[in-house]
Amino acid sequence: MSYTEEHATAYPAEYLAGIDLYNAGEFHAAHDAWEERWRDDCGPREKLFLQALIQSAVVFHHVEIGRRGAARRMYRMALEKFERLGAERFMSLDITDYLAQLARAVAWLEASADPRDAVQPADFTPPRIRLLPGAMDYD
């Protein structure tokens, strides 16, 4: 399980549904779940966090459909959002660890001069999202 009952009580259902979908490799569906919450009246920091997660999920959707250039652009956009958020942990996600996993997953894209020529490694693995113990205030 990626989260606990405490998380389920503290956080919006769309956030947790997005995590389940993301971890199942359903990146477009995870995007949709998080976007549903993002469109709600959530606060500005949660909006920024969700947008960064959405963009990081879209990276892997683009990889799946062969749009490597779009994947690399989306990765860089997600990084910029996480940097603006300026948190090491948000909504119980260890952002530092997640970004390290994300960087490892797309290193092959980042290393290529032209992402269209990048060769996806056989051991390509998107990050897993597991929330840290304990719920925390957000926004």
Image (cartoon, rainbow, N blue to C red):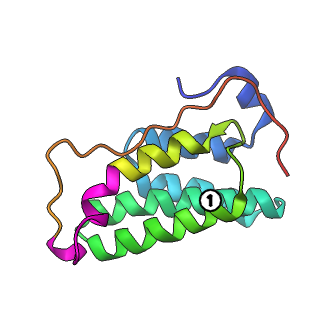
The residue at which mark 1 appears reads as 82
Query: In the rendering, at what x and y percent does residue 77 appear?
Result: 52, 71
- 128 relative to 67 in the view: left or right: right
- 58 relative to 84 in the view: left or right: left
Q: Is residue 2 magenta?
A: no
**Magenta residues (range):** 105-117
Query: In the rendering, at what x and y percent does residue 40 appear?
Result: 77, 62
Query: In the rendering, at what x and y percent does residue 139 appear?
Result: 85, 52
Q: Magenta region's main secondary structure?
A: helix
Q: Which residue is drawn at 33% across and 49% down?
A: 105
Position of residue 88 relative to residue 9, above or below, is: below
- Determine which quarter of the picture holds residue 113: bottom left
- 17 relative to 8 in the view: left or right: left
User: Callout 1, which amino acid?
Assistant: Phe
Position of residue 73 relative to residue 139, above or below, is: below
Q: Can residue 35 be seen from the camera position used here?
A: no
Position of residue 35 relative to residue 73, above or below, is: above
Query: In the rendering, at what x and y percent does residue 55 appear?
Result: 51, 64
Q: Residue at x 52, y 58 (%)?
A: 31
Helix, strand or loop status at disc 1: helix
Residue closest to the eye, 94 or 40: 94
